[in-house]
Amino acid sequence: MITVRYFAAAAEAAGVDAEQLPAGSIAQVRAAMVSLHGAALDRVLSRCALLADGTRVEGDDPVPAGAVLDVLPPFAGG
């Protein structure tokens, strides 16, 4: 299992701040997130950076058991 932490718009779309999901590739984890939370989260995920233990991951990159995956939408800065 991995811990997924949602921030800002991603947390709003998912309806949770964090959850446990099975480990796997980013594609598999993303599919699980969308299956659980629907199209609203899918739209947000298309703009998010995904970081597994602080390292950006995408596509077929693995997220090993025990990892923390942060879902970070773009933030406005100033």
Image: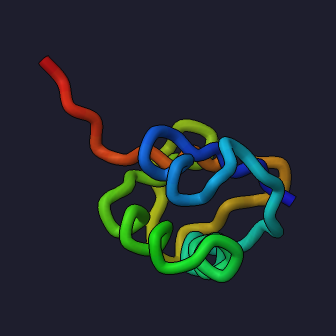
The residue depicted at 57 percent of the width and 70 percent of the height is 26
| Quarter-of-image position of residue 38 | bottom right
Q: How many marks?
A: 0
Left or right of residue 32, residue 75 in this image: left
For the view shown, which residue lies furthest in the left direction? 78
The residue depicted at 48 percent of the width and 52 percent of the height is 10
Decide which of 62, 50 is in the foreground and name it.
50
**Whole-percent x and y of residue 56?**
44, 50
Left or right of residue 20, residue 55 in this image: left
**Whole-percent x and y of residue 15?**
63, 54
**Whole-percent x and y of residue 1?**
87, 60
**Whole-percent x and y of residue 29?**
65, 72
Q: How is the image coloured?
A: rainbow
The residue depicted at 72 percent of the width and 45 percent of the height is 18
Q: Which quadrant of the figure contains the C terminus?
A: top left
Decide which of 12, 2 is in the foreground and name it.
12
Decide which of 28, 43 is in the foreground and name it.
43
The residue depicted at 48 percent of the width and 58 percent of the height is 57
Left or right of residue 53, residue 19 in this image: right
